[in-house]
């Protein structure tokens, strides 16, 4: 299950919980990764609005302060990349962030150019993880990404999909290619990945990033209409966000969930899921039954 | 794109409603006082459409064309593109519409105002809405007035004013109606996906314009 490291939690406003940060190892390297990351879809696409950019920087400040490391983005996400870069530079975190990016172009030839443009936006020396976004032209991109990894210009290579799309092709790539990471949709209600993708990831030693943990908001909005069950305290959940995230990251194959937010209060809630007790299999089944009955 | 049927409209919305409306606020502040000549041009178009004739039609075409070109370059390329990569394509469409309007204005007899027709009166009403009421929508919907979308410098009122003005012309020029109608579809889908209360405005005006245009000389 989850390995625990002794990363000290910094005191932050409105959140008293301290303790050990829960991490999981990336199977291909053993490197420990905190189980909660930060997504940027929609939330960080704020353009050149200085006020909103400052808000995103605050979200990142609290994310890092609570022990977060992995931030995920894509060239498809509008201005998210320069907004991340702005925040990383303001916080002095360009070298220790775990940068998870994507390649999103149908042209294999334009791939390296796009990666370099993304890197300049992030202002990082190199990306930790580069993923083929939604399998777009993966046949052309994957060999180039593997070569970049061999040359030391990337640390990890992966592929992504969302909402259960193209799982058949996804599985075939997982079987036939050397991948460090996959990214799929997985949450309390969207569990199609449990059938084949997640077991295959364990079998092949591939780390898993779980996207859309709250179905981009509607899932958490729905849960918040109901009281948190008292037994959620048994797994140290203080709110629904932690309930939903702990369910995801307690799956043995899942390495990290990547909720997105523009709210400091929400990033605090989300990061709380990286601390305390995690559900076991019986508790996970109870969580599913409870949420499906709401 | 494979499995396209599994995608929802919201999968293509790259930004939040807050970011979208705040964009207009920042844009308006940055280009101030361009709103003044833009509104003056809009009021000028209203006056020209009341007068009727060839020269008012051509001047209207020039003013509309300049609005489309400004919106292509300054709004779409400069402001919308950072949060929506599709805006670069929108800019091309707006520039094409601007060029078409200027070419039509330069071509004698292509644009002549026929103020006596019933559809011309409807068109005049649409232009009034585009220039006056559209800018007031934020106030009506409880948003800051600084988020106003102004004719000639913002895409939606520029498109609807163009539809209205073209209805007031002696002959319906369908080639000039296509891109404004297409923009009505694009923007209404964006607003609808954002659950914006004004999402119905553009489709209603577009439908009204189509109905009036197909009636021809009525």
Image: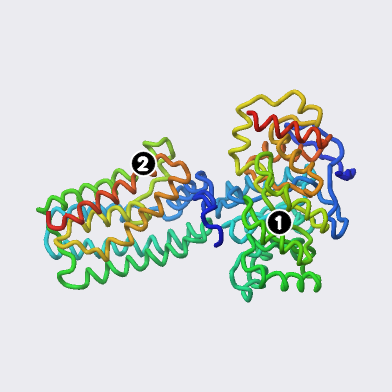
Seen as rendered, the residue at the extreme left is: B116
Please name the colour scheme applied to the rendered image: rainbow
> Which chain letter matches label 1?
A
Q: Measuring 86% from the left and 44% from the top, which residue is drawn there?
A: A1
Q: Which residue is more in the foreground, A252 or B145? A: A252
Residue B70 seen by the camera: yes
- Between circles 1 and 2, the one closer to the viewer is 2
Residue A37 vertical placement versus A284 (above, below): below
Q: Which mark is residue A26?
A: none
Q: Position of residue A33 (x, y in %)?
A: 82, 51
> At 49% from the left edge and 48% from the top edge, which residue is drawn?
B20
Q: Position of residue A113 (x, y in %)?
A: 64, 72
Position of residue A227 in the picture relative to residue A69 (left or right): left
Question: In the rendering, at what x and y percent does residue A201 appear?
Answer: 78, 55
- Viewport quadrant of the N terminus of chain B: bottom right
Under tag 1, what secondary structure?
helix
Circles 1 and 2, Cβ within 8 Å, touching? The answer is no
Q: Crowding at label 2, few (<14), some or many (≥20) Cα neighbours within 10 Å? A: some
| SS at circle 2 | helix
Mark-to-mark CA distance, 1 and 2: 39 Å
Residue A85, quarter of picture: bottom right
A273 horizontally vs A136: left or right = right
Expressed as whole percent of the image width and height from the top left, the position of residue A37 reads: 73, 48
| Residue beneath disc 2 | B137
Q: Do the residues marked 1 and 2 share a common chain?
A: no
Give the labeled residue for mark 1: A89
Decide: is A13 above or below A110: above
Return the residue found at the far bottom. Answer: A109
């Amino acid at each position: 299950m989850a390995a625990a490291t002794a990363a000290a939690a910094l005191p932050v406003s409105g959140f008293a919980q301290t303790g050990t940060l829960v991490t999981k190892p990336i199977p291909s390297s053993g490197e420990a990764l905190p189980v909660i990351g930060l997504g940027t879809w929609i939330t960080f696409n704020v353009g050149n609005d200085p006020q909103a950019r400052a808000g995103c920087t605050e979200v990142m400040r609290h994310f890092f302060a609570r022990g977060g490391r992995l931030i995920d983005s894509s060239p498809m996400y509008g201005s998210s990349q320069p907004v991340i870069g702005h925040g990383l530079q303001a916080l002095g975190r360009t070298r220790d962030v775990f940068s998870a990016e994507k390649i999103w172009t149908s042209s294999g030839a334009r791939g390296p150019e796009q990666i370099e443009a993304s890197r300049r936006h992030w202002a990082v020396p190199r990306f930790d993880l580069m993923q083929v976004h939604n399998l777009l032209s993966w046949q052309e991109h994957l060999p180039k990404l593997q070569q970049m990894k061999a040359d030391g210009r990337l640390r990890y290579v992966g592929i992504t999909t969302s909402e259960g799309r193209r799982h058949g092709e996804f599985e075939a790539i997982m079987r036939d290619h050397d991948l460090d990471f996959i990214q799929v949709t997985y949450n309390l209600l969207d569990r199609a990945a449990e059938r084949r993708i997640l077991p295959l990831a364990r079998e092949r030693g591939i780390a898993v990033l779980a996207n859309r943990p709250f179905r981009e908001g509607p899932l958490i909005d729905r849960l918040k209409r109901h009281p948190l069950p008292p037994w959620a305290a048994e797994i140290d959940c203080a709110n629904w966000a932690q309930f939903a995230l702990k369910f995801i990251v307690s799956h043995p194959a899942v390495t990290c969930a990547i909720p997105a937010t523009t709210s400091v209060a929400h990033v605090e809630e989300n990061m709380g899921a990286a601390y305390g007790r995690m559900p076991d299999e019986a508790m996970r089944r109870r969580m599913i039954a409870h949420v499906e009955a709401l | 794109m494979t499995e396209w049927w599994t995608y929802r409209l919201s999968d293509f919305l790259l930004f939040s409603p807050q970011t979208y409306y705040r964009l207009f606020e920042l844009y308006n502040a940055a280009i101030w006082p361009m709103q003044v000549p833009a509104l003056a041009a809009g009021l000028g178009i209203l006056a020209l459409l009341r007068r009727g004739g060839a020269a008012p039609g051509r001047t209207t075409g020039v003013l509309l064309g300049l609005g489309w070109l400004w919106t292509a370059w300054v709004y779409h390329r400069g402001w919308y593109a950072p949060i929506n990569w599709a805006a670069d394509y929108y800019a091309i469409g707006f520039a094409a519409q601007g060029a078409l309007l200027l070419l039509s204005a330069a071509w004698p007899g292509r644009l002549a105002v026929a103020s006596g027709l019933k559809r011309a009166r409807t068109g005049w009403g649409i232009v009034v809405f585009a220039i006056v009421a559209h800018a007031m929508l934020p106030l009506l919907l409880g948003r800051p007035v600084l988020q106003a979308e102004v004719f000639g410098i913002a895409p939606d009122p520029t498109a609807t004013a163009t539809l209205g003005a073209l209805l007031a012309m002696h002959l319906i020029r369908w080639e000039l109606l296509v891109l404004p109608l297409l923009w009505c579809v694009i923007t209404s889908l964006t607003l609808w996906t954002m659950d914006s209360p004004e999402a119905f405005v553009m489709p209603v005006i577009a439908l009204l314009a189509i109905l009036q245009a197909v009636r021809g000389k009525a």
